[in-house]
Image: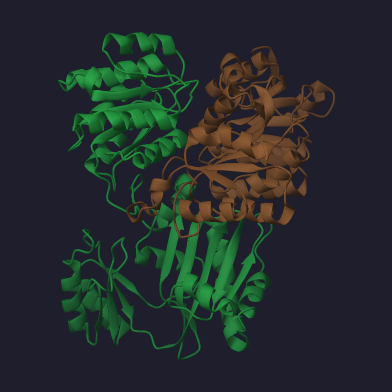
Chain colours: A green, B brown
Amino acid sequence: MIFYEYEARRIVELAGIPVTKYGFCQTPEEARKIAEEIGGPTVIKSQVLTGGRMKAGGVKFADTPEEAAELAAEILELEINGLMPVGVLVDPKAEVKQEYYASVVWDGNAKKPLMLFSDMGGIDIEQVAEEHPDHVGRGHVSNLMPVGDYEAKQVIAATGVTGSQLTRATPILAKLARLFRENDMILAEINPLAELTDGSFVALDAHLELEAEAEGRQKKLLQQELGIPAGEIRDHYVPSEFEKNVKHLDAADHRGVIQGKDHGFEGNLGLVIGAGGGSLTLTDAVRSQGGKPANYSEIGGNPSVAKACGLAKEVLKKDGVEKIAVMMSIVSNTRVDIVARGVIKACLELGKDPGETIAIFRIPGAWEDEGNKILDHYGVEYCDRTVSLWEAAGRAVAKIQGAS
Amino acid sequence: MSVFLDKDTTFIVQGITGREAINLTKECLDYGSRVVGGVTPGRKGRKVHGVPVFDTVAQAVENHGGEIDGSIVTVPPGFTKDAVIEAIDNGIKLLVVVTERIPRGDVAEMVEFAEMNDARIIGPNCLGLIVPEVCKMGGIGGPAKDAAKSYKPGVVGVMSRSGGMTTEISSSLSAAGLGVSTAISIGGDPIIGSSYAELMPYFEADEQTKAIVIYSEPGGRMEAQLADWQKEHDSRLPIVAFMAGKFMDDESMKGMNFGHAGTIVEGKEDSAAEKIKRLEAAGIRVVERIDEIPDVVKERISA
């Protein structure tokens, strides 16, 4: 789950990390009221789940409440990267003395959360790490022991920060690490963490991501504290029709699993493939041999005829798809005859000849002989495990290239 | 010789009364593995293919009358951490965690607990491990007769982030006459109990193993860790790697998830291209085509 800026602000605020007095508004009138309460220059920020807000004109500065209302009206109507904002955030224009960076991420090799801190905030941390490694402090925290303030202090002190800056930043980083663990985050970043002219520290912007697998047990935070409706899906990109349809087909039937993606694909060879690793290998094999996949997909477990048929149909209905290749790595639980029946049914229902439409069928799995009989009947070319994934993909590519 | 398992290895199945677990238990028994008990809270007294079911791991250990070597954990995601810790607390040292979709924090907790107790976790989100014609611990290779077809005893150690590809690769090694010493499906999650580099010393110590094949994907830093390990240790074992998911390096695929939970390109370092570069710099041969693996392994063994 990714969050709007106003939600991320709220989450860090709940963890006891200081933030500015901000307000989330959905009308210009609300924006005016918040700006009045703030009393002084404000920043109006579009609330969209995409980057590049500043460049797109989604972040603007206002001197008066009237101006704040006008700018809010503009930004509320402004589409950014195809997305309309859900509102605007009105924030006091902060008097910043220095910007810092604080984050917690997973270190998959150490298998522990990793705290990062830099006294060069506001810019890309990877760039800082490369160009000024002595300005980045790092430290792991245990998964089992409570996070100690001293652990955060060590990380910050490693960057050379001392004095009141060290003592003020320390609890913020420690709280961020606790929030990361307690709320099942996979990213918790405050950038910039600002030291204001009065010496106080506030989180000016926060980026948080909560692990999808943990949404169920974080209901209190998501639904009660943030008011996010149960089942709301937020992705880094807008799913296509194909993706939505495949998801729907998968949810409608509990037997087996199908997944489909076509973001970034626009070829003429539809892929009805599996399982996880097999799909990755096969997609590469098609591309490396000059083929143009129309999509990516995954068949897993033992899908029903309807499910296999549904996936094949969705692939065949995509613009530009001429043939499909039905291929999987060696599987023991997927019934070959069921998948064969499903993909043939898809061809027939769309008025296509299965023998012509299915470029290759390679699924070494259960009930293989029964599957082969059906494929024979419809004149579909098939092969067994003695034909590698690379070669099977190559045959499909050769067929579609010969056809066009 | 082999890695982790031999013909005397005993293990239990936690969550044994679940549908998939019942199949898995049968597969392992048919293969000749010693499944000495199962645990499902509230189901004490039942039997699954002749295997006695208990409420607790402690009861299973008591019934066995001595230490049990391993456990296959296949309970729902919300209960997995507790089940794994229960097993370790009862002296079990080898855990195969099959469950998918466990929150990362839970995985990290159980891995840290395992480290403190000298236990080893394989997975989560994995199919387990197999020593051909000796022992199969997990769903790896499927029913016993299918597993026998794909896995012949031999000299290659296989480690793979994809359960299915463990079998695909092992089948090609078996068909080529090389065979498999031990094959381990290490799991497809962003955090797993045992990475390639962490398993290398076990293969290194196994006389039967003459070469290693790894199946790899974009996402994470596990390949970089293996490259560093290989540079530091100068292993006697040649390593041949296959990298799937090269298409994910395209800018349009950034941040998208394919195949497994851990398979996602977020930065430059976890792209397929960068991983290939690092592996090759460490002397690990990365093949372009999946079907090149057996020939390249033969070449590297005789070199």
Q: Is residue B9 above or below residue B102?
A: above
* Residue B195 seen in render: no
Instruction: Indicate whether A322 appears above or below B132.
Output: below
| x and y, in percent, of residue B17 in the image | 59, 21
**Horizontally, is B171 left or right of B130 in the view?**
left
Q: Is residue A47 left or right of residue A104?
A: left
> Where is residue A155 drawn, in percent x and y?
63, 73
Work out which residue is located at the far bottom of the displayed protein and give it: A197
Near-viewer residue (B278 or A209): B278
Q: Is residue A140 visible?
A: yes
In-front residue for pair B9/A115: B9
Q: Is residue B301 left or right of residue A277?
A: right
Nearer the observer, B286 or B18: B286
Look at the image and tell me in which quarter the C terminus of chain A lies.
top left
Q: Residue at x 21, y 80 (%)?
A: A68
Looking at the image, which residue sits at the far front? B303
Looking at the image, which residue is at 47% across and 78% down?
Answer: A121
Q: Position of residue A238 (x, y in %)?
A: 27, 50
Q: Residue sitting at 29 percent across and 42 percent down?
A: A262
Q: How many marks?
A: 0
* Relative depth, front residue between A136 and B252: B252
Image coords of residue B260 (percent x, y): 47, 41
In the rendered image, which quarter is residue B120 located in?
top right
Q: Is residue A117 above or below residue A292?
A: below
